[in-house]
Image (tube, coloured by chain):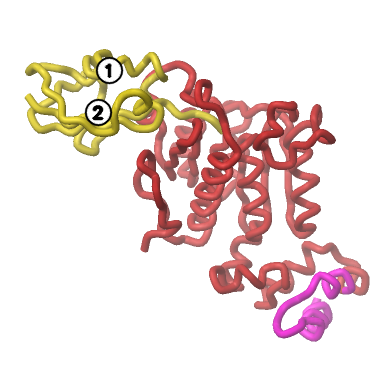
Chain colours: A yellow, B red
Amino acid sequence: MHVLVKLFAQYREGRFKVEQKEYQEGTTAQMIIDTLELERVSPLGVLMVNGRHVAPSYRLQEGDEIALFPKVGGG
Amino acid sequence: MCELLTFLKEASLEGYLPLTSSFQAMERFTCTFREVEEMALKHDILPLRYKRNQKTISTQEQYRLFQSTVLIIGCGGLGGFVAEMLTRIGVGNLIVCDGDSFEEHNLNRQNFSSPKTIGRLKAEVLKEHLEEINPALHVKSIPTFFDPMSDAKLIYQADVVVDALDNPDLKCLLAAQCHDAKKSFVHGAIAGYYSQFATSALLEPLYLQKGDGAEKRSGNPSFTVCFAASIQSVEVVKLLLGKPHLQAPLMGNLWEYELISL
């Protein structure tokens, strides 16, 4: 299935901003996070699919758009 | 008091009350600077210091800001600049809370940090500087770290609460407390070139995983701190004046941001 992956802030460094990706049926958001090794950069802050907050266990569907933001906590 | 008002009307120049007239009024009527400015604003006389606000903020709105109380939790990067901006725009009462003291590594970004203030409590330094900028302002400094249990009463005293903390867990707790107390709440956070904002929202969806934020890796540069503090300040002012505020968290791809969307 096709999923549009959007990365933000520090997650983009050495990766990409937006890419159309091909994943197997049943792929979860957490599996995408693991494949991209995002947690090596920073813990996950925000996870949205099609503009809505979802849990990392969310199973992606054909045509979904996933957005991943690192955790930002400085004050 | 009627005589004071007559004096203020006569002492105004082109409709604005200059500082020198306020000081004269204090002496003549034995009252505080704050009482003079309050009397003026209440009767539609604008202190000259707000002249350049006036095309954006009317004199009636200026009086509303004067009567408002904003609680700022954290007096570091975000808190120091939010506090100064709210002071200059004319918010009348600020409560600033932080148990930390200025250190050398704060000098790159934190307002009012300088070689002279290193080692001093941030909340107390802020109070001194803010009241120097505007003597009509009332600042309460709480020089202890925010404690969600014992500081709950502070939240009730405020019209708007500003999250200028640097700890994601505490940020989430504060947001939840404000939500329960039905208090307006303005969140901001930064890391490197990036910042995020949310108004009157719970923060768990913005802090999904445990652990240090990206700022530990990307740092806290001054321009991002000031930018984020500006967004937070305009959110506070809009909340106080009943203007439309952010409806959804603002994050990512931030090239331009209209400071108000009508």
Tally of marks: 2
Quarter of image, res B96? top right
Q: Is residue B2 magenta?
A: yes
**What range of the chain is rendered magenta?**
B1-24
- Toward which corner of the image does residue A46 lie, by quadrant? top left
- Give the side of residue A40 with respect to residue B23, left or right: left
Image spot of residue B221 (x, y percent): 58, 35
Which residue is at a point 68% across and 32% down the rendered structure image?
B98
Residue B53 drawn above or below residue B117: below
Residue B77 x, y percent position in the rendering: 62, 37
* Identity of the residue furthest to the front in this view: A14
Q: Is residue B153 visible?
A: no
Q: Residue at x 72, y 85 (%)?
A: B14
Give the spatial CA distance, label 2 vs label 1. 18 Å
Q: Is residue B108 visible?
A: yes
Chain letter of mark 1 equals: A
Q: Above or below — where is B169 with respect to A40?
A: below
Residue A36, which numbered label? 1
**Quarter of the image containing the C terminus of chain B?**
bottom left
Q: Residue B206: where, in percent of width, then height? A: 38, 31
What residue did someone put label 2 on?
A: A54
Residue B242: x, y in percent? Answer: 46, 60
Mark 2: give few (<14), some (14-19) or many (20+) Cα within 10 Å: some
Q: Amino acid at mark 2?
A: Val
